[in-house]
Image (cartoon, rainbow, N blue to C red):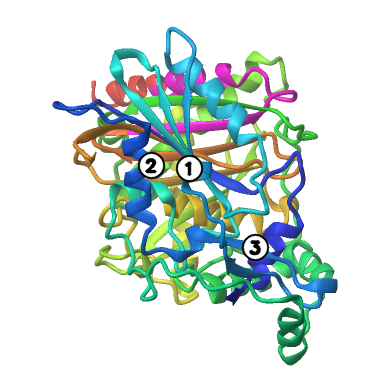
Amino acid sequence: MSRLSPVDAAFLHVEEPTVPMHVGSVMLFEPPAEGVVDHDGFVEVVGDRIAGHGRYRQRIRQVPAGLDNPVWVDDEHFDLTYHVRRAGTPAPGGRRELEDFVARIMARPLDRDRPLWEAYFVEGLQGGRFAVVTKAHQAMVDGIHAVDLAHLLVDPDAMPVDERGQASVPAPSDLRLVADALLGSVLNPAKVVRGVGRGVRDVSRTGRRLTETAGALAVTLTRVGVRPAPPSPLRAHVGASRRYVMVETELDDYRRIRSRLTRGRYVADVTINDVILATVTGALRAWMQNRGLPVTGSSSLRVMVPVSVVDGTGDQLTDSSLTACFIDLPIGENTPSMRLHQISFAMRQQIESAAAEGVDASSLASMGGFAPPTLHSLGARLGSAMTRRLFNLVITNVPGPQQALYVEGCRLIETYPVMPLGRSQGLAIGLTSYDGKVYYGLTADRDSMPDVDMLADSIHEALAELSSAARSARD
């Protein structure tokens, strides 16, 4: 039995039916060259991967009268087949059908009476392919006691296993829970919730909590003063339904843009991440214009970007940290190359500020193995713990391995994060680069942003616009 940290407990307390606090992933696989991978076989694979990771077999138990934070206890009736489910898409089994499936299941809150995760084995896709869709609560995936299931599936050596193996411990009685609460520090859950988001004054305090809770999560918060985020069409009442869109782009396109549009003293400081943010900026600009919304020279939209920062080795997830960067995207800037340089300058200031605060921000790099799903989960935790008045949108961009990975002989061909929506925030964007591609996962509120497909198309257009500017720069 272990007690939830104040931050983990807060993720449970602030969850609402229309704002579930889980993070997901979508992985598409080619069928194996020989044999068949079916649902039963996939259940066995998941069982093997989580066998030594007790958090996947634990549920949350509330302390009577709310005397203390809830505790993790072993689920004595754990049923793997409840969590690993079989699903299919209607014909023709294309991208749109898979996106609709992901949107439906991600809108549903997880069952609090069971371990807080699910995995879906999705059949019926074109070309004999299949997909694995995972979802796990933010209170569960903290990078220390649990990493994301997608991380474990592709990289089973992601973290040390529990020494106690699969032996379950009987759940404690209410009397035991009350006694432990009285002997320990008595916390007021309502106070925990208030501490999660009270504006700029509480942001640094929340960052310290996250650092203490996740250990590997070193949070650097830039000083944005008391100035709230600018007005945004993304601010909306979030309903219970979702839209989800997947966008695939080529990593080499971003590399060419970077090499051709960057010159001068700070050329080495312009990163692929900057080019991606410039692409998103152009896409949001086009989306607003297509909606008929006013876009002036001073228009901007503030994003919170959890940036993965490593100590130079990049071998273990525990060597990583996350730095929260607040960037005002220059939506009103008409020239794509100028948008890139403005974003690069702003990011460079953020990273230098992080270094001044003692965080090693010398490199932005990929982890070993397949850490992106876990880092996306940690990024979502970071965004959810902050007051929403500071930013309009969360964008997580995590670099992954640039070689093909396999699960039971099946090649992973595409991978997309599924980020949660915050209260009053109608869009979240997650990106993962893998095996020569950059994959965007766009999660949107169905009612306030039914035209998220338009934004997806605008990503391709904005990337083409930057590519055209890069060609002109060399002509």
Q: Position of residue 358 (x, y in %)?
A: 45, 77
Q: Nearer the viewer, residue 345 or 212?
A: 212
Q: Residue furthest top?
A: 92
- Place residue 230 in its image quadrant: top right
Say which element carries label 1.
Answer: helix
* Whole-number angstrom distance, CA of label 3 to CA of label 2: 23 Å
In the rendered structure, find residue 389 and report the number of the disc placed on it. Answer: none
Q: Residue at x 41, y 43 (%)?
A: 274
Q: Which residue is mark 1?
A: 81
Local packing at callout 1 (Cα closer than 10 Å; few below 14, some 14-19, many 20+) is some
Amino acid beneath label 3: Ile
- Amino acid carrying mark 2 in the image: Val
Q: Residue at x 45, y 28 (%)?
A: 336
Q: Amino acid at mark 1?
A: Thr
Q: Earlier in the sequence, mark 1 or mark 3?
A: 3
| Residue that sits furthest to the bottom in the current view | 183
In which quadrant is the C terminus drawn? top left
The relative height of residue 211 versus residue 235 in the rendered view (above or below) is: below
Q: Is residue 12 magenta?
A: no
Above or below residue 305? Residue 94 is above
